[in-house]
Amino acid sequence: MSVKQIQQLRKVVFSQKKTWNISTPFSYRFDPKTDKLILNYSIRIIHRKNGKMVNTQKRIQKYFPTITTANWKKFFDGDRSVIRDDAKYVENEINKHSAKTITIDENDWNYWIQNYITRTTGQTKTLKKLSPLTTKQNKLHLEQYYVWLIQHDPNSSDIHTHIDKGVFWFEKYYQYKLDKGDWANETVHTSFRNIRGFYNYVSMRSKIDFPYNILRRLQIPQATNTRDKLNSVEFAKVVDFINEKKDHLYWNKFVLMLSLQMKTGMRISELCFIKKSAVNLDLKQITILGKGDKIRKLNFVDKADKGIWKSIVKQYNISDEGIYLFFRTRLQYFSKTDTKKEITISYDKPTTDGWYSKKFREMRSELGLRDIITSHSLRRYFITEFLKTNSKDLTKQIVGHSSDEMINKYIGDMIEEETTTTIDIGI
């Protein structure tokens, strides 16, 4: 890469922007290490500074893997030039992120939403660190509510108006969602908890006289758990699937994760975020980081754990320097052999909940399991089966629950076809 080439590129870009009347701010440069072309532009982002939300600019770089110092001229040749397509791309990116910026005004509804969904700690009885799943859920429900509100009443952008109308608006909102068929009543309850928590956050943090717990008068339907645990027939199907697919290039990572969830009842998020540093090869033990940063240890010392521990060790040894046991992969199709295979994206990033859930749905469809069965059904199955031979206190520790009430919610039907439901009275 020479100074002359850079000057030539800048001259061509300047000329073509002028010819096609392109005013969108972006530029190009060459990577000094790879000689590949890089598109540079900036977007507006929201970030937290000194406890407050502010707008700022973030520089973005987009690499062109096929455009280099050796061939760049043909990509900027006359009407075939990439510059107009790049201008449209950058303009769309700028507009998309500009819509997310906020007015730095504590009277603005969106200002408080952004403060709420970007916080790292929350408070129930005590302050606690928020999990990524909690933050994701806050963002989902609050942003959906915000979009609906602005469409139905522009005055809702002022936080003061929620003092008198907040109850009325949310009641109309969840009725709209129910009528549309978007929500089960369990989702209504989840949305209610998220929005109620947000209003209470405003009450505690804002300088205006915003009442606490303004949604208390709403009568929200109690959430009903529609999930079911696996029955004995479904359980057998899944076990057969594991034995059949454990060495399959497309299924093997999922099969190990599935086996681990079935044997331990852990949550999907806990499963995906297991770090290699949490695996003790000598003790045959995995340390699990659960909700609220609660730590528990799972042992694989039983004779029945020999097979799965061997698979865990094999997965552990794939990468010497990776961070996560189940690192991030993606599906690759190989046309020559007509096969699908999971290939590595990064050893330093975890497998996502979405990847695991998608694989579970594929398996469910292939095995003909009931639609009501989800990956969470495995947790219900584990708790139900483990309680048959163990104490409730031990079960709580193993699955990361703090109360008997939560365990009771997860217990499925413990009476199966072969279950003895009578006692011997001598007759």
Image (spheres, rainbow, N blue to C red):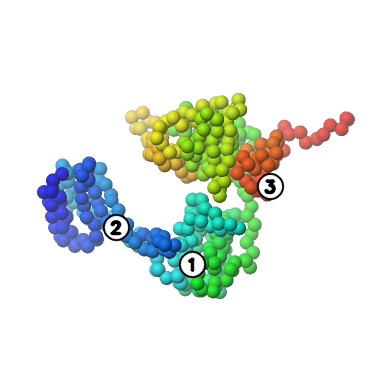
Element type at mark 2: strand
Q: Which residue is rendered at x = 62% and y = 48% of the image?
A: 226
Q: Check disc 2: other Cα within 10 Å, few if <14, some if 14-19, many if 20+.
A: some
Q: Which residue is rendered at x = 42% and y = 70% of the image?
A: 105
Q: Are marks 2 and 3 in contact (CB under 8 Å)?
A: no
Which numbered mark, 2 or 1, is in the foreground of this view? 2
Quadrant of the rendered image containing residue 211: bottom right
Amino acid marked by disc 2: Ser
Q: Position of residue 156 (x, y in %)?
A: 48, 71
* Label ID, residue 42: 2
Question: Could you say which is closer to the camera, residue 296 or residue 69?
Answer: 296
Q: Position of residue 300 (x, y in %)?
A: 57, 31
Upstream in sequence: badge 2 or badge 3: 2
> Separation of disc 2 and disc 3 at Cα?
52 Å
Element type at mark 3: helix
Q: Are marks 3 and 1 in contact (CB under 8 Å)?
A: no
Residue beneath disc 3: 404
Residue with the most extreme right position: 427
Q: Check disc 1: other Cα within 10 Å, few if <14, some if 14-19, many if 20+.
A: some
Tally of numbered discs = 3
* Label ID, residue 149: 1
* Label ID, residue 65: none
